[in-house]
């Protein structure tokens, strides 16, 4: 498999998200060579759901390096995620990763589903 690392990422990670991802990477003892998978899948309240988790790189993926985090994303998902920001909220009412996606026409109340 050809090694391709692209430096211009279609998405951004806030400092808060990076801090939590690094904590999770360490706590969950993610295997060496795994990176953060960001993508979309059909389903959810509004049509698409976000995918966020640690995974191995596949042949369909483009690899990005964002603030020291290896990010894997299928090329075809870039259309839906271009300009998206992944943030971490740690408030009284909300705690977790938040997806701020400028391509989403509608989102649901849970914030993990959208339509494009």
Image (tube, rainbow, N blue to C red):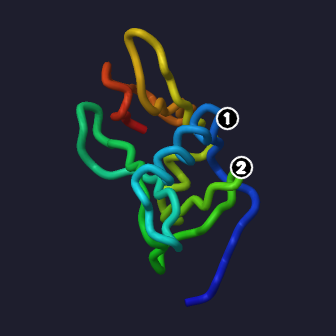
Mark carried by residue 15: 1
Secondary element at tag 2: loop
| Residue at 49% over, 33% down | 99
| Residue ranking furthest to the bottom | 1
Q: Residue 46 at what x, y percent from top left? A: 29, 32
Picture quadrant of residue 13: top right
Q: Residue at x 75, y 61 (%)?
A: 7
Q: Is residue 91 left or right of residue 109?
A: right
Q: Residue at x 44, y 71 (%)?
A: 56
- Within 10 angstroms of label 2, few (less than 14), some, or many (20 or more) residues? few
The C terminus: image quadrant: top left
**Residue 47 sits in quarter:** top left
Looking at the image, residue 96 sits to the left or right of residue 102; the answer is left
Local crowd at mark 1 within 10 Å, few (<14), some, or many (≥20)? few
Q: Which residue is mark 2?
A: 67
C-beta proximity under 8 Å, tags 2 and 1 = yes
Residue 28 placement (x, y as % from top left): 40, 53
Q: Residue 45, percent across and down?
A: 24, 31
Question: For this rendering, which residue is in front, 58 or 36?
Answer: 36
Q: Residue at x 38, y 27 (%)?
A: 111
């Amino acid at each position: 498999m050809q090694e391709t690392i692209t430096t211009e990422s279609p998405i951004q990670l806030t400092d808060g998200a990076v801090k939590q991802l690094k904590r999770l990477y360490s706590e969950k003892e993610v295997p060496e060579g795994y990176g953060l998978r960001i993508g979309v899948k059909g389903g959810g309240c509004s049509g698409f759901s976000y995918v966020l988790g640690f995974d191995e790189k596949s042949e369909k993926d483009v690899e990005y390096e964002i603030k020291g985090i290896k990010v894997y994303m299928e090329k075809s998902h870039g259309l839906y995620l271009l300009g998206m920001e992944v943030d971490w909220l740690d408030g009284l009412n909300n705690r977790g990763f938040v997806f701020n996606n400028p391509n989403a026409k509608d989102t649901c109340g849970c914030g993990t589903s959208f339509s494009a």
